[in-house]
Amino acid sequence: MSKIFKEFDMTEKEYHHARYNLTTPSYVISQDIHEDSLECKVLYFDSDDGVALIRHFCEVFDSDGFNITLIDCNYCDISYADMLEIIQLFKEFDEATEGEMELA
């Protein structure tokens, strides 16, 4: 779990508040732009114990899809509005980093 805290620049207290506050779904973003990798990830909290790690790239669809991994839970509810916002974030990341890997 400490890897998640570090990757998303969160304390354990912040993580548990986001995970269990029962009122406000939220997410945090991690963008990794290096010579050999471009990655945008979202850690989504439904505020009722559901946590999902959403990566902007997946094996099947490359940058035309995303990958969702549940973090120590069996479900994570995501509103349409939040999912659309996350998809838009991924599209903007792809546009902003287009051509970055070819330059490296």
Image (cartoon, helix red, strand yellow):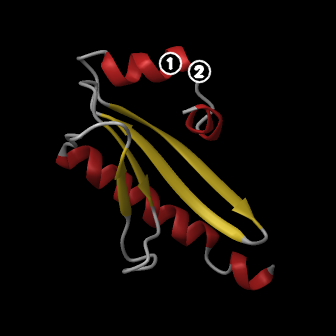
Type of the residue with mark 2: Thr
Q: Is residue 59 left or right of residue 47?
A: right
Marker disc for residue 11 = 2
Residue 21, given in percent of the width and then of the height, sits at: 31, 15
Residue at 49%, 63% in the rendered image: 92
Q: Nearer the viewer, residue 53 or 91?
A: 53
Seen in the picture, residue 63 relative to 70 is either above or below; the reply is below
Secondary element at tag 2: loop
C-beta proximity under 8 Å, tags 2 and 1: yes
Residue found at the very far bottom of the displayed protein: 102
Mark 1 Cα-neighbour bin, 10 Å: few <14, some 14–19, many ≥20: few
Type of the residue with mark 1: Glu
Residue 72, given in percent of the width and then of the height, sits at: 36, 37
Question: Could you tell me which quadrant the C terminus lies in?
Answer: bottom right
The residue to which callout 1 is attached is 14
Mark 2 Cα-neighbour bin, 10 Å: few <14, some 14–19, many ≥20: few
Residue at 45%, 63% in the rendered image: 56
Secondary element at tag 1: helix
Q: Nearer the viewer, residue 64 or 76?
A: 76
Distance from disc 2 to disc 1, alpha carbons, whole Å, reads 5 Å
Within the image, what quadrant is residue 35 found in?
bottom right
Residue 49, given in percent of the width and then of the height, sits at: 28, 27
Marker disc for residue 22 = none
Within the image, what quadrant is residue 50 found in?
top left
